[in-house]
Image (cartoon, grey):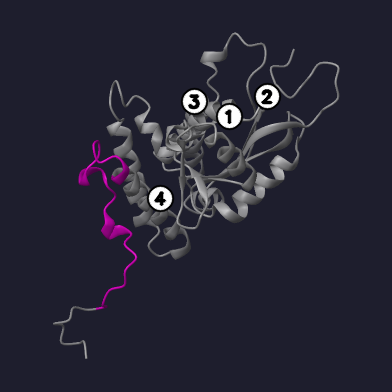
Amino acid sequence: MSRNPYIIDDQEPTLCESVFVFMDILGYSDLMLQSQSANKEQPALRDIHSALLASRRRLESQTLFSISRKDFYALKSFTDNIVIGWPVHSDAQAEFGIAFPRLAEFQFNMAIRGYFVRGAISVAPAYVDEVVVFGDALAQAYKGESILARDPRIIFTDSAVRAVERHLKYYSQAANAPHVRDILKDADGQWFLNYLESVLIAEDTLGPLYNEFMQHKIAVEKKLSEHTSNPEIWAKYAWVAGYHNYFCDLHTNHFDDEHRVNIELFKSTPSLIAGEDDSNVQ
């Protein structure tokens, strides 16, 4: 018997309301081209394979649900794309509760290895197996990833936002809802997964994962330095830097200037091309 929750014995493939995510790795094509031109394809393959393998193992963890006859999700990957569907059994709140921490941990673990992920979450009919991925959930998530996500963030499509808004109404105070710390609203109005929340997974008992958080800072600063001559790509990592520092601001009880990305690497204010006391300035 297949553990894929979309496959029902003796039944034809059938669409099922799902929490669905479509993700890809930022700069994957450039990575292949650059490694080829530098004759470093094998080391590049080894590195990204290791990062994906480690991150996917965390994403696929089913330890808490090993007694179930079916998995809670179906996952399919091809080249740099990963799609995951969680069939919805009620109103998607439980599925969000399973999906969000796994997706956040996957995105965070890829980032600290230097691979930043972009994607979109939808809630709509889908079908996922080894043969085909199909449904409106895929169409929405693909459009969200390719048009709306833009930066290394996993955004919420309109259908996912509506589902979260419905869940928030279950609580007398929306701030008490479990999703509140999992989601942030960006300056352009897009909701996105707060993947840095992963470092606070053991906040009450062990405190933040400081070493991993510093690895994220270092990875972002490295990308900013590498792409200063490519404004379009540099801007994406400047976004991550701003998000990283905002997360520090949200949790000043844990993080200080030591943990922040160096603002000199990504500040967006203009400056003079020479000092005011420079004799060349007229």
Do the residues bearing badges 4 and 3 touch, measured as CB atoms within 8 Å?
no
Asked if residue 50 shows in the view, the reply is no
> Relative to residue 2, is residue 183 drawn left or right?
left
Q: Disc 1 to disc 2, how far (Cα)? A: 9 Å
Mark in the foreground, 2 or 3: 2
Do the residues bearing badges 1 and 3 touch, measured as CB atoms within 8 Å?
no
> Which residue is rendered at x = 81% and y = 16% of the image?
9
Where is mark 1, residue-wise? Answer: 93
Q: Disc 4 to disc 3, how far (Cα)? A: 22 Å
Label 4 sits on a secondary structure element that is helix
Q: Disc 4 to disc 2, how far (Cα)? A: 34 Å
Where is mark 3, residue-wise? Answer: 58
Examine the image and state in which quarter residue 78 appears.
top right
Residues shaded magenta: 249-273
Do the residues bearing badges 1 and 4 touch, measured as CB atoms within 8 Å?
no
* x then y, percent, for residue 229: 40, 65
Q: Amino acid at mark 1?
A: Gln
> Relative to residue 129, is residue 248 drawn left or right?
left
Asked if residue 200 shows in the view, the reply is yes
